[in-house]
Amino acid sequence: MGFTEIPKGGCQELALKKGMAPLCAFEKTILNGLAYTPAIQSTVSCAGFYRNTNNIDEYKKGSTFLASLNNEVGQGTETYEKHRNRI
């Protein structure tokens, strides 16, 4: 299914222990604003598993992995039907 927030124990825990709140805010900005750009989708592995529930249209349009894996895009296309029939 993917993830919708930065997991607890990750950045939030660092922010509390070491005063890293600005870094966490930057990380969240990157995830929300750039996660579905082609450059990030092709280079940052965790971006492929990010599902922004606040902007499903952007997620479906820009996700190169998870949306397809979850059968949220591509259904009804010739390629989808071809692959489904092979299964």
Image (cartoon, rainbow, N blue to C red):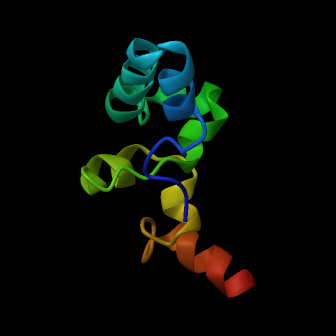
What residue sits 48% from the left and 59% below the top? 67
* 7 vs 3: above or below: above
The image shows residue 48, relative to residue 83, as above or below, that is above
In percent of width and height, residue 18 lies at 55, 15
Is 70 on the left-hand or right-hand side of 57? right
Residue 76 in the figure: left or right of residue 2: left
- The mark total stands at 0
From the viewer's perspective, is residue 51 above or below residue 18?
Answer: below
52 to the left or right of 24: left
- Residue 37 is situated, as x and y percent measured from the top left of the image, at 42, 29
Residue displayed at 63% across by 81% down: 84
Q: Nearer the viewer, residue 18 or 52?
A: 18
- Image coordinates of residue 50 in percent, x first then y, are 49, 47
Q: Nearer the viewer, residue 54 or 16?
A: 16
Query: In x, y percent, where is residue 76?
Result: 42, 77
Report the residue at 59% width, 35% height from top: 10
Is residue 39 visible in the rendered structure shown here? Answer: no
Check the picture and name the quadrant holding the C terminus: bottom right
Q: Is residue 65 above or below residue 70?
A: above
- Please name whichever residue, 13 or 60, is drawn nearer the observer in this view of the structure: 13
Please indicate, yes or no, whether residue 15 appears anywhere in the rendered image: yes
| Quadrant in the rendering for residue 81 | bottom right
Residue situated furthest front in the rendering: 17
Residue 13 or residue 36, whichever sits in front: 13
Task: Say which quadrant the N terminus sits in.
Answer: bottom right
